[in-house]
Image: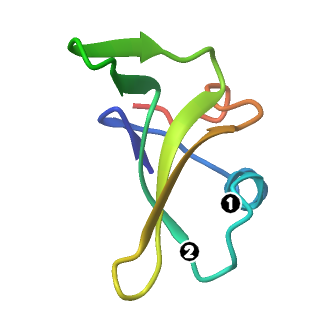
Amino acid sequence: MFIDGMMIAISDEQYESARLQLDLPPGFVMVEATTLLHHDTGNGHVTIPLPNGYIVAAFERTGGNRSYGVVFINDLYRAQSPG
């Protein structure tokens, strides 16, 4: 999957763990992710880099319903695909 434009290999176990952390049913699929949290403070936008292993993930199910959340993926960068 692409995280911040970089191809990252995520195992089935890591993927399932991320979905369960957001308490989402099996019909949701992770469609995008970033290691940056973008926050609107009311006085402007702030970009906050998350600690290693944490991502903001977007999950989507049929019909276009989306759910977003911050999840931890164990060994995220060790699983990175070569390239």
Q: Coloured how?
A: rainbow
Tell me: residue 16, above or below residue 37.
below
Which image quarter holds the C terminus? Answer: top left
Residue at left offset 54%, top offset 17%? 50
Q: For this rendering, which residue is in front, 64 or 6?
A: 64
Q: Residue furthest left?
A: 44
Q: Image height check: is 39 above or below 79?
A: above
Q: Secondary structure at mark 1?
A: helix
Q: Earlier in the sequence, mark 1 or mark 2?
A: 1
In the image, what residue type sits under mark 2?
Phe
7 versus 60 height, above or below: above
Tag 2's secondary structure? loop
Residue marked by disc 1: 19
Q: Quadrant of residue 77?
A: top right
| Residue 40 on image: x %, y % | 30, 24
Q: Say which amino acid is labelled 1.
A: Arg
Rate crowding at label 1 as few (under 14), some (14 to 19) or many (20 or more) other CA atoms within 10 Å: many
Label 1 to label 2, Cα distance in Å? 8 Å
Q: Are marks 1 and 2 in contact (CB under 8 Å)?
A: yes
Lateral position of residue 26 relative to residue 13, left or right: left
Q: Is residue 45 left or right of residue 37?
A: left
How many numbered discs? Answer: 2
Residue drawn 74% across the image and 63% down it: 23
Q: How crowded is the residue under tag 2: few (<14 C-alpha within 10 Å), some, or many (20+)?
A: some
Q: Nearer the viewer, residue 2 or 69?
A: 69
The residue under the point 20% across, 14% down is 44
- Residue identifier under label 2: 28
Taking the spot 50% from the left edge, 47% from the top edge, the residue there is: 57
Q: Where's residue 33, x and y in %?
A: 43, 43
Q: Position of residue 67 (x, y in %)?
A: 49, 61
Label ID, residue 60? none
User: How far across and how far down the image is residue 26, in percent?
Assistant: 68, 79
